Structure formats: C-alpha cells, structure tokens
Image (tube, grey):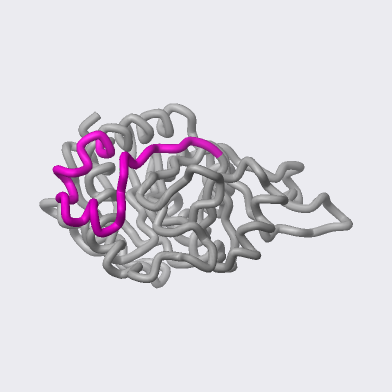
Amino acid sequence: MAGPTALVSALREELATVLGLMPDEQQQVFGGRTFWRGHLHGHDVVAVLSGIGKVAAATTATALIERFGVQRIVFTGVAGGLAPGVRVGDVVVARQFLQHDMDASPIFPRHEVPGYGRSTFDADAALTDQLVRASDMVLKDLPALLGDEVMRTFDLQSPRCHLGLLLSGDRFVSTTAESAALREDLPTALAVEMEGAAFAQVCHDYGVPLAVVRTISDRADDAAHVDFPRFLHEVASRYSGAIVEALLRG
C-alpha cells in the first residue's frame, strides 16, 4: 500500500478509542481539522473526525486525499436503523450510498446526483468484504468486549452484521413519521446517517476505495434510544476500536 489508510469517525468518543490504539500519533492541523498521523498494526494511518453533515464530510474526504494522499478510507460511526430486523446493537456495512434529501427535480429525477446520472455510489467491494469479516469477528465475541452488564442494559441479543444500502442526509431523522416515509420511498435502505454518501461521492471522483460501518444506536423513530451518551461510550466506541483493529490485523 503506497499511501496511508484513513480512519474516520463521526463522533469524538469513537475517534478517541482509535487514537488509543495508535502508539505514535502526531497532530497536524489543516483546513480547520485536526488530523493524527501514526501507525496501527503495521499500517501507516491518518485519523480524523469527519464533521457532521455532508458538506463537512466532503471537505474532510477531500483533505484526506489531496493533503495526505490516503489510499483507502475506513469510516466508523452510528446510525438509525430503518429496515425490519436492523436492531440496536447491530452493525450495518454499506454496499451502496444514497442521499435521501437530494432532489433537483424536475430537472433531474429525485435522488439523482446532478452531473452523474446516478443516485447511488458504491463502496469498494474488496475493502467492504474485509470490513464485513472484521465486524462478524467482533460480534461473535461481543460479551468479552462489552461485558454481561452492558449486554443486559442495552438488551443486545445476538447482534448481527447487515450489508446493503445506507442513506445519508442533512437532517437528523428521529421521528416515526420521517422513518416511515424513508422506508416507503427507499424500501431497501438499512439505516440512515449524515455523512456516508458524501464520502462515497468524493471517493468516486478520486478513485479511492471506501468502506463504512455503522453501529445502530436507535431505530430513527419516536422511541429513539434515550441514553445515547452511555451507548456511545459503552457500546459504539468499543465496536469501532475493535472492528478497526480486526480489519487492520487482517
């Protein structure tokens, strides 16, 4: 691998978990972002927070490619589950990405990205397969990672890894009405978040492999998880660190 691997997190707690695994990280500030250069399990890596929303995500992705010459990007974060059977504590690995709030109609069909003739962008197949294997490995030994008390507290019963369509948009989806509308419009969607599709479009433009894994923190509805900070600290951040480690160890 000629250039570094980018490790991107949506939230500070997840990035802190990844940084805790790096023995020699050094900070660099560029474009209003703090990037950490270092090594992890023999890999040259750059870690950074994506920022929230599609514009921040696109800026971060471009900086990683242009400034740091990354050769692949791995993104970890949380998302709201949409599809039936996608439960709190499951993970979704993206095969494709779509901006659910992209609408330049009537000039272009709804969801189509102007200038591209398409509404979806693909994750890198090989890197995604590796991320699925890493996620499955972590989920198989989850009690050892989280502890029985955390498993009981969040009712984590045999969490699964799902592979498919991930939605992104500049709106935090947290009501049953919004969630139902997304499921009706885009019935194959597994989960919804705010950055993945922007990373996918930038990576498509530059030809850089991208893989994204999201931990399901809630069902993106009126019953969304009430103790999100604890879930983030005790579940999602540990998932991120363990999955990244499993991926880089091969």
Location of residue 129 (image quadrant): top left
Q: Looking at the figure, which quarter contains the C terminus? A: top left
- Can residue 18 be seen at all in this image of the molecule? no
Compared across the picture, whether 192 is left or right of 14 comes to right
Q: Is residue 219 above or below residue 137?
A: below
Q: Extreme right residue here?
A: 106
Q: Would residue 13 appear left or right of 101 to someone viewing this image?
A: left
The stretch in magenta equals 138-164
Taking the spot 70% from the left edge, 45% from the top edge, the residue there is 119
Task: Quadrant for the N terminus, please.
Answer: top left
**Where's residue 240, x and y in %?**
29, 50
Residue 171 lies left or right of residue 32; in this view the side is right
Residue shown at the point (35%, 64%) measured from the top left: 11
User: Number of callouts in the render?
Assistant: 0
For residue 174, side relative to residue 134 (left or right): right
141 inside magenta stretch: yes
**Which one is nearer the viewer's eye here, 146 or 151?**
151
Q: Is residue 148 visible?
A: yes
Look at 45% across and 56% down and name the residue there. Answer: 79
Find residue 145 and report its horizontal and vertical position in percent: 17, 46
At horizontal 62% and vertical 48% (from top left) the residue drawn is: 98
Q: Tell whether position 163 is magenta.
A: yes
Q: Position of residue 56 (x, y in %)?
A: 50, 66
Q: Position of residue 75 (x, y in %)?
A: 39, 49
